[in-house]
Image: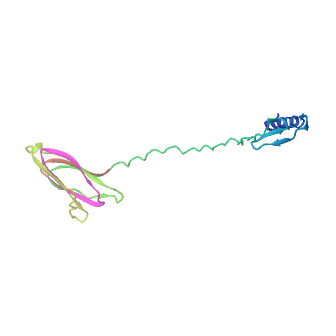
């Protein structure tokens, strides 16, 4: 395959050869390079411009081998851990006042709760329901105690203490109570 640069050089040689063999009445005409990239021939009577041909540089784009990016496989996503099942610490139902047996809230428990319901319909419709929390030494924690008056109700109270506890229930109604770590 013939390169473009070779063709241009060949054309240049031919043009220069023809120009150098031109004669006029006084003999061979000298070739003079003009300042603009062209050649001029001069004789005592005429001037003729002959364009010069310059080789055009060619650039060959570098070739690269295809790049293979290794595929990485990430491990299958793990399912979110299931929350630990609630741990029941105490369940009790009664009517009237009572102090519960002691129960232990584990040291790793962030919180625990007391859930209750009460119904006063059996004693004329209106009554009271109160819960106090005591630690293992028998001291009232003075945490948010439960204190309600009415015909009945229910609720949940949350605590963040750990250790041994008991509940003191004061009521003239039928009630159920549960302490648990959620």
158 falls in the magenta region: yes
Q: Is residue 50 left or right of residue 151?
A: right
52 falls in the magenta region: no
Q: Position of residue 158 (x, y in %)?
A: 26, 53
Q: Residue furthest left?
A: 124
Residue 20 visible at all:
yes
- Total numbered badges shown on the rendered structure: 0
Q: Position of residue 102 (x, y in %)?
A: 26, 59
Q: Is residue 120 left or right of residue 44?
A: left
- Is 26 drawn above or below residue 134 in the view shown? above
- Is 154 drawn above or below residue 48 in the view shown? below
Question: For the point 10% across and 48% down, which residue is it?
Answer: 127
Residue nearest the viewer, comparing 116 with 30: 30
Residue 91 visible at all:
no
Residue nearest the viewer, comparing 10 with 25: 25
Colour convention: rainbow
Residue nearest the viewer, comparing 111 with 103: 111
Q: Is residue 75 left or right of residue 175?
A: right
Q: Residue furthest front?
A: 45
Which residues fall within the magenta stretch?
A: 147-170
Residue nearest the viewer, comparing 18 with 125: 18
Q: Position of residue 153 (x, y in %)?
A: 17, 45
Q: In which quadrant of the rendered image does the N terminus lie?
A: top right
Q: Residue furthest bottom?
A: 137
Question: For the point 25% across and 62% down, which residue is it?
Answer: 135
Q: Main secondary structure of the magenta part?
A: strand
Question: For the point 52% across and 43% down, which residue is it?
Answer: 76
Q: Quadrant of residue 65?
A: top right
Q: Quadrant of residue 43?
A: top right
Q: Position of residue 116 (x, y in %)?
A: 21, 48
């Amino acid at each position: 395959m013939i390169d473009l640069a070779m063709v241009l050089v060949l054309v240049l040689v031919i043009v220069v050869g023809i120009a150098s063999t031109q004669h006029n009445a006084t003999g061979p005409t000298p070739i003079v390079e003009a300042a603009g990239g062209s050649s001029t021939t001069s004789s005592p009577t005429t001037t003729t411009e002959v364009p010069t041909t310059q080789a055009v540089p060619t650039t060959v784009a570098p070739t690269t081998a295809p790049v293979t990016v290794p595929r990485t496989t990430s491990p299958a996503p793990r399912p979110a851990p299931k929350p630990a099942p609630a741990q029941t610490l105490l369940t009790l139902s009664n009517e009237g006042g009572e102090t519960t047996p002691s129960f232990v809230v584990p040291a790793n428990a962030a919180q625990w709760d007391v859930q209750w319901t009460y119904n006063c319909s059996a004693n004329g419709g209106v009554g009271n329901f109160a819960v106090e929390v005591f630690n293992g030494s028998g001291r009232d924690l003075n945490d948010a105690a439960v204190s309600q008056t009415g015909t009945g109700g229910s609720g949940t109270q949350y605590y963040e203490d750990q250790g041994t506890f008991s509940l003191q229930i004061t009521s003239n109604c039928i009630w159920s109570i549960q302490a648990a770590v959620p």
